[in-house]
Image (spheres, rainbow, N blue to C red):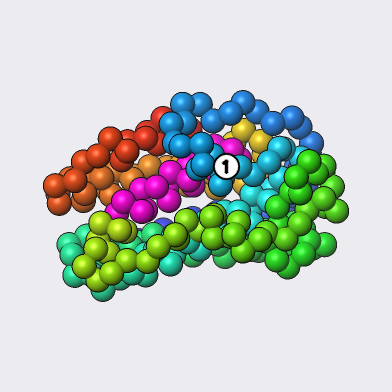
């Protein structure tokens, strides 16, 4: 049943792709994400630039890299043997892999002229000009994936739980950025789904950490981004 529901969700994401491209239009960026309490460095990492006709392409490329980081993190706990941790890692991997596939199909359909490599807007570039996009650097990819370290077998439970809290926080910021700047109904739908799913997973990650005796104030810094 769970796999069937996941497949239905993926189909619902893919179905409106053509409509989403047709609905692209220029508009000014909305207000900053309200109540965000994460450090300035995280805002910089997840800054996708202003709205414009290339915004959805930039958002897709950034979110694909971000999700890829979550896949890599989850793989470290697949065989962990700790109640709930491995199954949560596999759930995160499965759901985000499906979203990566959907976003890849949208990218091909909506931006056939775009470079194969992920792109970002040049400093001071025109957000409506494809010519002002540049290849995402290795450092930018690494920052977006948020995989600054790898765990040992001894610390990988807390490494995963705490790291995924921060990682999901980054996705919440990016999802709100899309709701502020994108007019594409498909992108906005996915952004809302990301907020709902990762809000639920953040609560589960915190529950697992409390079970192990960990409950830090920083675990709650993204709660202001839970609402849609």
Q: Position of residue 168 (x, y in %)?
A: 42, 48
Which residue appears at 43% of the width and 51% of the height? 167
Judging depth in this view, the residue of 207 and 195 nearest the camera is: 207
> Going by the image, does 25 lie left or right of 163?
right
Q: Circle 1 — which element?
A: helix
The residue to which callout 1 is attached is: 44
- Percent position of residue 172, x then y: 48, 42
Residue at 78%, 53% (x, y): give it.
133
Residue that appears at 37% across and 70% down: 75
- The answer to whether 109 appears left or right of 200 in the picture is right
Residue 176 shows in this picture: yes
State which quadrant residue 116 falls in.
bottom right
**Rendered position, 23 above or below 110:** above
Asked whether residue 193 is in view, the answer is no
Residue at left offset 66%, top offset 61%: 137
Is 164 inside the magenta-drawn segment?
Answer: yes
Q: Name above or below for residue 11 compared with residue 183.
A: below
Residue 54's place in the image compared with 89, above or below, is: above
State the extent of the magenta-drawn residues as a range: 161-178
The picture quadrant where one finds residue 159 is bottom left
């Amino acid at each position: 049943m769970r796999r069937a529901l996941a497949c239905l969700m993926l189909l619902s994401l893919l179905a409106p792709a053509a409509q989403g491209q047709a609905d692209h239009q220029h508009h000014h960026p909305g207000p900053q994400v309200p109540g965000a309490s994460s450090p300035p460095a995280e805002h910089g990492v997840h800054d996708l630039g202003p709205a414009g006709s290339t915004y959805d392409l930039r958002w897709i490329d950034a979110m694909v890299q971000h999700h890829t980081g979550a896949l890599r993190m989850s793989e470290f706990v697949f065989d962990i043997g700790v109640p709930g941790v491995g199954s949560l890692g596999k759930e995160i991997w499965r759901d985000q892999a499906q979203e990566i596939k959907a976003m890849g199909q949208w990218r091909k359909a909506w931006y056939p002229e775009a470079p194969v490599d992920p792109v970002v807007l040049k400093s001071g570039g025109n957000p409506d000009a494809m010519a002002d996009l540049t290849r995402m650097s290795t450092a930018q990819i690494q920052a977006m994936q948020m995989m600054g370290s790898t765990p040992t077998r001894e610390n990988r439970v807390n490494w995963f739980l705490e790291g995924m809290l921060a990682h999901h926080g980054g996705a919440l910021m990016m999802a709100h950025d899309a709701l502020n700047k994108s007019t594409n109904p498909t992108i906005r739908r996915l952004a809302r789904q990301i907020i709902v799913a990762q809000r639920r997973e953040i609560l589960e990650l915190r529950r697992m950490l409390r079970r192990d005796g960990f409950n830090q104030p920083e675990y709650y810094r993204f709660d202001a981004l839970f609402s849609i």
